[in-house]
Image (cartoon, rainbow, N blue to C red):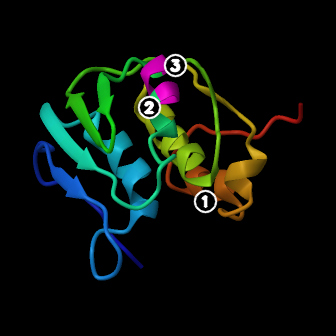
Amino acid sequence: MLTVARPGPLHPINVITDTHPGFATDLQPPLMALATQAPGSSYFRERIHDARYALVGEITKLGADVTVDGEKAVVHGGKSLHGAEVIARDLRTGIALVLAGMVADGETVVTNGAMIERGHADIVARLTALGADIRREQS
């Protein structure tokens, strides 16, 4: 069993992805989604995967304030997100959008959900067990 709690407010971060033993590029999109909730500016530098910032075009539809300049991105966090329709362009972007949608006001629709389910078996059941209001709809 894991018990997870946030003991206080979130804080902005600095992340530079790198090969092992550096910060894993696969974790950058979900961490960027989390950074939208931390007041202040979080800095990301993606050194591994050219297309990893695909999340930015979608998460800004939810109201996130993110700027990208080449391999660098800045998340100006602490602002409320709002529901919108977004596209899971890949597995990591998809799960980051699900996480962002869980903290957004209103309903978020993540299309191309097969991308998410490819890497996260039973994601709806698992997040529902954590208290999320999430469902899979056939298109």
Outermost residue toward the right in this view: 139
Frontmost residue, 25 versus 82: 25
Q: Real-space Cα distance between discs 1 and 2?
A: 26 Å
The residue at 65%/56% (across/down) is: 123
Whether residue 106 sits left or right of residue 47 in the image: it is right
- Identify the mark nearer the N-term, 3 or 1: 3
Over which residues does the magenta segment extend?
57-61
- The residue labelled by disc 3 is 83
Q: Real-space Cα distance between discs 3 and 1?
A: 21 Å
Discs 2, 3 touching: Cβ within 8 Å: no
Q: In which quarter of the image is residue 121?
A: bottom right
Whether residue 51 sits left or right of residue 40 in the image: it is right
Q: Nearer the viewer, mark 2 or mark 3?
A: 2
Relative to 96, residue 40 above or below: above
- Identify the mark nearer the N-term, 2 or 3: 2
Residue 69 at x, y percent in the picture: 29, 32
- The residue labelled by disc 2 is 56
- Identify the mark nearer the N-term, 1 or 2: 2
Frontmost residue, 77 versus 44: 44
Q: Quadrant of residue 79?
A: top left
Frontmost residue, 2 versus 76: 76
Residue 72 at x, y percent in the picture: 27, 41
21 inside magenta stretch: no
- Amino acid type of the residue tagged 2 in the rendering: Val
- The residue labelled by disc 1 is 126
Q: Real-space Cα distance between discs 2 and 3?
A: 15 Å
Local SS, label 3: loop
The residue at 74%/60% (across/down) is: 118
